[in-house]
Structures are given as structure tokens and as C-alpha cells.
Image (cartoon, helix red, strand yellow):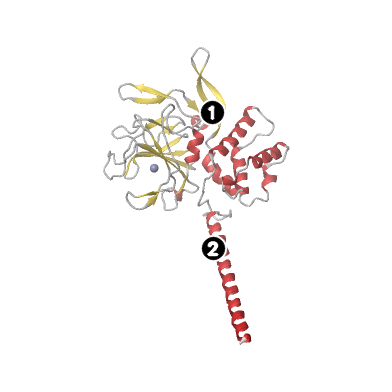
Amino acid sequence: MIIKHIKINHLLLISILTLIVFISSSIIFFYSHKNNSTIPVNSDNENDYIKWVDFTVPCNVLKLTADLDINSHNNNEEVKLNWIELLAYLACIYGGNFKSFNSNDLDKLVENLKSGKTMEDLTSTLTFYDYYLESYSAILSGFIGDYSIEVLDSNNNKVFENKYGLKAFLPIAKNYYFTHYKDFGNSRSYGFKRTHLGNDLMGSIGTPIIAVESGIVEQLGWNQYGGWRVGIRSFDGKRYYYYAHLRKDHPYVESLEKGDTIKAGDVIGYLGMTGYSVKENVNNINVSHLHFGMQLIFDESQVDSPNEIWIDVYEIIEFLKSNSSEVYISNEETKDYSRKYDFMENFLTE
Ligand SMILES: [Zn+2]
């Protein structure tokens, strides 16, 4: 009896052990393949462009790194810092999840760079640095740089001033109230079941809507979901800005057309509640708001496909609150608004 019992227990133990080994290897297999599919590794293959980006950088980290970049340029420091490189480095050490952000890591990186180490030295063992650098460049490369903007001189005359700094604007005009919350990925029920691929900025109907970045108007007109909408592509082609649910009857600033060049900070249209209808010019949205979205394009095949990459822009909106465009009624007849202070950046003159 005892021998029989031991035999049975022995068999049971072997079975359990085999099962454990099988389950754990399946888990390892699943996760290793999952990671491979979300983070593409560079190769010479033409089709090997970036297929997916999760943007989780919080506003306070955007601000810290932006200030380091801007101050190092404006103080003409010996070592110029690049906020996108700083962010890509941090993303590597946190595995893309900024919940683990610790300002000591950023301080240490800056200290290393200032002591003469190069980003190349510091990232030589970080496998995903190139991936994060390319992803974050696609998102943020139009945000900080050289620009000229009108300011008032001592006699209250407008004069252009050359600057280096944040040159992307909040999509809501200066002095207009709005609220928003983290709504990226929430489910939406109109039409087919789908997720929310942007951030809703709740405000009053008629609030002037501002172009975040300079670019070319690529889409304009009615869209079943977005209602009256504008799509603007950045000059480098990497970002497509989507502004939707614009005002019934008077959605756009006068004479706005497809193909127009838009400057960062220009008025492009007005907040409304149009959309969710195949019929044009219908208010079918319950709460007046701007739907603001940013799509990333690494390859033109991603523009209009099931593989579109839309990122969470909530933290970007928070970050852009520090730079909003002041507007005034420039046409009493049409009640259209214009920006108060003109703006120029290099590629606009080329
Ligand atoms: Zn929305």
C-alpha cells in the first residue's frame, strides 16, 4: 500500500511539474512575441517602419525636459540639450512607462551630458533608444525651435522678435474656457463599436479653434463622425492634426481651403457640436466640444488604413496650456476672428 501511494504521488508530482513548465513557457512565449509585435526592430526591410506608438509622457516631464532644452539654447550653454533625446533616454530606462519617473534620473542624465559624455555613449546599450527617438520625434519635433513672433515695443507698436522656444499652440484660443479629462480609448457607440482616438475639449459654441502646428490643410468638409472637420498635416509629413465637430453654419474661418498653408497659432474654425450624421450641417453631438486628435504617419500606407496610429494627446493639451494664441474679431461683417500677433518660422518662407 505504502509503495503504491508513493508511486501515485510521484506520478502526480511529475504531472504537476510538467504542467507548471508548460504554462510558464507558454506565458514567456506569449509575452516575448507580444513585445516583438509592438516594438519593431530596425532592419533594411522597406516595410519596417514604426507600426505602433504609446505616448505616456506626463505634462510635468514634458515641461521639465522642454525647459532644459529651451534654457540651454537661450543661455547659450556649451552643451545644448535636446528634450526629445532626453525623453527617449528616459523611455528606455522606464520601458516606455513614465509612471516610474524619478527626477533624479533626469538630473543624472543632464549631469552626464554636461560633463562631456555624448548621447551616443550613454545610449549604446539601450536597445530601444532609436525606436523611442524616432517615435517621440514624430510626435514632438514641431513643438520647440526657432521662430519669430510679433510683440509690442515700448511705444505699443508690433515688432517681430526672434525667439527659441515652444512654438506649438493650444487648440483653444487664449482667454477662452474649456475642460477636458483623460478620455483616450473610451468606447463610443455611434455607428460601429469603436474607441475614442483623441481628446475632447468641452467649451462654448463659437470658441475660436487654433492650429497647434504649422502645416497644410489636407482635409476639409463634412465627415459622418467628425461633422465639420479640418485635418492639417505638418510640413515633415509625420503628424496629422484632426479638429472635429466644428460649428454648424459657420465652421471654418473665412476662405479656408484644402491645400492652404496654415501657421501655428492661426484661427482655423469655431467650436461646435456637429457630427454623428450622414446628413451635412447637423448638430447631433450632445455636448459642444472640440475633438482634437493627432495621428502619426511613418509610411503613407498608414494614412487611411486599419493600422492608423492615433496617440493620447491629453498630456500634450495640458503642456500646451502655457502657449495660447490671442485673437480678435477681424471682420465685423462675417464675425470672423484672426490671431492678434503674427508668427513666422523658417520653412514658411521657403
Ligand atoms: Zn472626441
- In this view, the residue in front, 118 or 349, is 118
Residue 30 is marked as 2
Mark 2 is on which residue type? Phe
Could you tell me which secondary element the residue under label 2 belongs to? helix
With 101 as the anchor, is 267 left or right in this view? left
Query: Hey, which residue is sitting farthest front in the picture?
Result: 1
Could you tell me which secondary element the residue under label 1 belongs to? strand
Mark 1 is on which residue type? Tyr
Residue 349, horizontal then vertical, whole percent: 50, 29
The quarter of the picture where residue 256 lies is top left
Query: Hey, which residue is sitting farthest top in the picture?
Result: 155
Residue 255, horizontal then vertical, whole percent: 34, 30
Residue matched to label 1: 147
With 22 as the anchor, is 257 left or right in this view? left
Q: Quadrant of the N terminus?
A: bottom right
Between tags 1 and 2, which lies in front? 2
